[in-house]
């Protein structure tokens, strides 16, 4: 069975004080021991989050570069994350793809470099509203996966997050049927293009307007193995999302 994973993506929100408070709140909460919890604060607060959180809770960067060190102003390496006990990174978030111009190829290269160097990756994919309305959802996601497959051979350190762009920050959550359909198609893609093992073992998270109100229903779907949470991860109710199956 796949272990449920619930990750907080703080995006570019918060202060040193608020990040510490969120971490202390998680330390003090009763969290379902069957759920893996990951917290991704802004880069400048990674160390504070790691120092504050108990060891059972992992920390993720929201980005990581694909070179070991050198003249890459503004970037952070996988080695530096490891050095700071940050074991995870989110890569390919739609905000980085659309606002920062990251292509499928850049995201795939970063994912390969990170996983080869001991960082687990939450790799994001998802369609725009226009693509969904044109009936292209599964095609778009298959193309994103195909670009990843060109670079990556070891899938054991990858968690996939399906985040329909139209559901991010809009309060318009995908229905459980819509999410399950895409998750099942990603799992089938893994079986057909990678291996039965990758298909059985890779966790597929849903992201996009997840809240303490809608998480329980989504979590019951066969192929939804957890969540990548934006806005609600900044609030105390994030604990209820972690405990969606309890
Ligand atoms: P919201 O939960 O705020 O919709 O954001 C989702 C997201 O982009 C998480 O990575």
Image (spheres, helix red, strand yellow):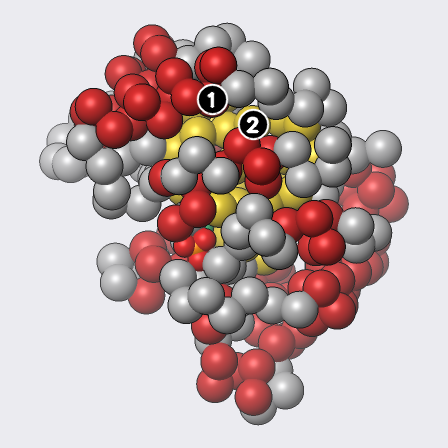
Is residue 110 left or right of 216 when viewed as pictured? left
Is residue 168 left or right of 176 when viewed as pictured? left
Pick the front one: 181 or 185 = 181
In this view, the mark in front (1 or 2): 1
- Which residue is pictured at 48% across the width and 85% down the height? 130
Pick the front one: 183 or 102 = 183
Q: Is residue 65 above or below residue 173?
A: above
Counting from the top left corner in percent of width and height, residue 142 is at: 64, 67
User: How many angstroms separate mark 1 from mark 2 (CA)?
Assistant: 9 Å
- Please tell me which of labels 1 and 2 falls first in the chain: 1
Is residue 223 visible to us here? no
Is residue 198 left or right of 94 when viewed as pictured? right
Label 1 with label 2: CB-CB less than 8 Å: yes
Residue beneath label 2, please?
37
Ligand 1 quadrant assignment:
bottom left
Characterize the local packing of mark 2: few (<14), some (14-19) or many (20 or more) Cα atoms within 10 angstroms: many
Residue beneath label 1, please?
26
Q: Is residue 56 above or below residue 9?
A: above
Counting from the top left corner in percent of width and height, residue 146 is at: 61, 60
Q: Is residue 1 above or below residue 216?
A: above
- Which residue is pictured at 73% across the width and 24% down the height? 34
Q: Is residue 217 above or below residue 114?
A: below
* Label ID, residue 203: none
- Which residue is pictured at 49% across the width and 59% down the height? 209
Counting from the top left corner in percent of width and height, residue 57 is at: 51, 18
């Amino acid at each position: 069975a796949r272990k449920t994973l619930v990750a907080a993506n703080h995006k570019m929100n918060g202060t040193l004080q608020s990040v510490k408070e969120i971490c202390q709140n998680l330390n003090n909460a009763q969290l379902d021991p069957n759920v893996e919890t990951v917290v991704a604060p802004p880069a400048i607060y990674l160390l504070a989050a790691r120092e504050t959180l108990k060891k059972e809770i992992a920390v993720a960067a929201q980005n990581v570069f694909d070179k070991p060190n050198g003249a890459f102003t503004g970037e952070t390496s996988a080695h530096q994350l490891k050095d700071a006990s940050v074991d995870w990174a989110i890569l390919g978030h739609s905000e980085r793809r659309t606002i920062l111009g990251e292509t499928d190829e850049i995201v795939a290269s970063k994912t390969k470099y990170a996983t080869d160097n001991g960082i687990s990756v939450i790799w994001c994919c998802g369609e725009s509203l226009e693509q969904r309305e044109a009936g292209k959802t599964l095609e778009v996601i298959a193309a994103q996966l195909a670009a990843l497959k060109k670079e990556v051979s070891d899938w054991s350190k990858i968690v996939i997050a399906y985040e329909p762009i139209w559901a991010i920050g809009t309060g318009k959550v995908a229905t459980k049927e819509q999410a399950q359909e895409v998750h099942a198609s990603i799992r089938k893609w893994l079986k057909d293009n990678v291996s039965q093992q990758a298909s059985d073992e890779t966790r597929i998270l849903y992201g996009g307007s997840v809240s303490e109100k809608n998480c329980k229903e989504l979590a019951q779907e066969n192929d939804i193995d957890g969540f990548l949470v934006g806005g609600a991860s900044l609030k105390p109710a994030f604990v209820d999302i972690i405990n969606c199956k309890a």
